[in-house]
Amino acid sequence: TLKNCLVRGNICDARAGGGIQNQDILRVENSAIIKNSSGDGNSQNDLSGAGIFNNVNGKAYIVNSTIGNNISTSLNRINGVGIFNFGKMTIRSSTIAENSLSFQPTGIHNLGDSLILLNTAIMKSKVKGNNIYSYGGNFIDELESDVTIITKTNANATWVDYFGNASTPLDAKLGSLQGFQDALFQYYEPEAGSPLIDKAIAITPGFDHPDACLGVDQRGQPRTGICDIGAIEVQ
């Protein structure tokens, strides 16, 4: 369990998981996974998940957290520079941004049993894989045409998401990464007029929390009214 933590600047040259590699149960809350890297040039080593690598038996829950600026320098066998999920993962009220290779921004890759997204913002970080489920309130600036996200519904509602594509990308109006290198809280804050503001899903029956809007954001600041998509609530 990581709560109110910063995982930054870790380097893994020959194994997957630059910042974190999880083999069992992982919970990341109110934390930032920033500027971690994995890479080995032309090596055939599997160097996936520079930010977080969740292995086949892993169960990961990420809430109110930022995964950003993670990189890979490898040219082969790259699956998800920010996050690679090989097990089960839920990402809730989080921001995933600017995770990239030098030649292709690949943020999240799911090859596991399930990847559940709720009230999460994904920018400049491509989503790849299958078994990806939306519980609503998600924002993706450019969703790949070959990726299907399964939307959870009930008898009364279909939860709203905001997905752009290559021909009509969405602009999150997200500011640059905040926080100095040694600052505990590092995050991206939506700018004025951002489509993330007041667009999160408030209630999602069947999810593990009856109120999908959390009481506070990554910094511990209160979420008020209709909460914002992502890790940060604009004050």
Image (tube, helix red, strand yellow):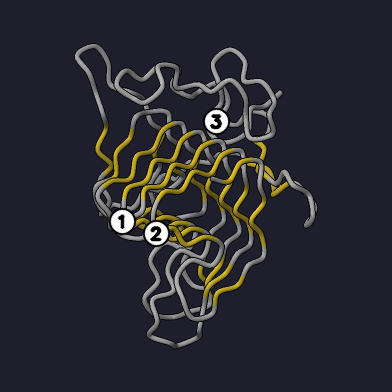
Position of the N terminus by quadrant? top right
**Mark 3 in CB contact with mark 2 (< 8 angstroms):** no
Q: In the figure, 8 relative to 90: above or below?
A: below
Q: Position of residue 62 (x, y in %)?
A: 48, 42
The label shown at residue 130 is none
Viewer-side label of 3, 1 = 1
Q: Is residue 149 left or right of residue 136?
A: left
Q: Which residue is mark 3?
A: 196
Q: In the figure, 26 relative to 53: above or below?
A: above
Q: Which residue is mark 1?
A: 57
173 or 113: nearer the eye?
113
58 or 82: nearer the eye?
58
Q: Is residue 217 left or right of residue 213?
A: right
**Mark 1 in CB contact with mark 2 (< 8 angstroms):** yes
Q: Disc 1 on helix, strand or loop?
A: loop
- Quarter of the image for residue 233 reads top right
Mark 3 Cα-neighbour bin, 10 Å: few <14, some 14–19, many ≥20: many
Q: Earlier in the sequence, mark 3 or mark 2?
A: 2
Marks 1 and 2, how far apart at CA: 6 Å
Q: Disc 2 on helix, strand or loop?
A: loop
Mark 2 Cα-neighbour bin, 10 Å: few <14, some 14–19, many ≥20: some
The label shown at residue 23 is 2
Q: Position of residue 17 (x, y in %)?
A: 48, 66
